[in-house]
Image (cartoon, rainbow, N blue to C red):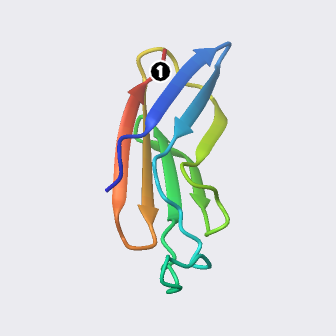
Amino acid sequence: MGNPMKIRAASKDGITEVKVLMSHEMETGFRKDASGAPIPAWFISEVTAKLGDKVVMEAQWGPSVSKNPFLAFKIKGGKAGDKVTITWVDSKGDTRTDTATVT
């Protein structure tokens, strides 16, 4: 499980903008360590976003996504006080879930 995500969610005129900074190494599997041995692939493979209990975004990622990925998206609806929950699962089966309140 990685470090907490930094999540910002703000609503204006019926549109909620969500910005997420995830802490993850995102290894591609193509790099080698100092001894020349390959570093195994390890990356976020699934991301799910919920507004309250409703899934509003799902993504499948691969090894080409950069280290500590940034994700931003907009949702119709949402108001101040609503909860946005982001969950990721990586290729080793580790998972992380964090929640933010819409402002």
Q: Depth check: give the residue in front, 38 or 41.
A: 38
Q: Residue at x 35, y 59 (%)?
A: 95
* Secondary structure type for disc 1: loop
Residue 74 percent across, percent down from the top left = 66, 33
Q: Mark 1: give few (<14), some (14-19) or many (20+) Cα within 10 Å.
A: many
| Percent of width and height locating residue 45 | 53, 66
- Residue at horizontal 67 percent and vertical 66 percent from the top: 64
| Residue at image mark 1 | 102
The correct choice, above or below, for 72 with respect to 95 in the image is above
Quadrant of res 99:
top left
In the image, residue 95 above or below residue 77: below
**Seen in the image, is 94 located left or right of residue 54?**
left
Q: Which residue is found at the position 53% from the left and 85% from the top? A: 36
Residue type pointed to by label 1: Val
Residue drawn at x 34%, y 65% as measured from the top left:
94
Count of all numbered marks drawn on residues in the image: 1
The image shows residue 12 at horizontal and vertical percentages of 64, 13
Q: In this orientation, which residue lies closer to the viewer: 33 or 28?
A: 33
Picture coordinates of residue 10, whole percent (x, y): 56, 19
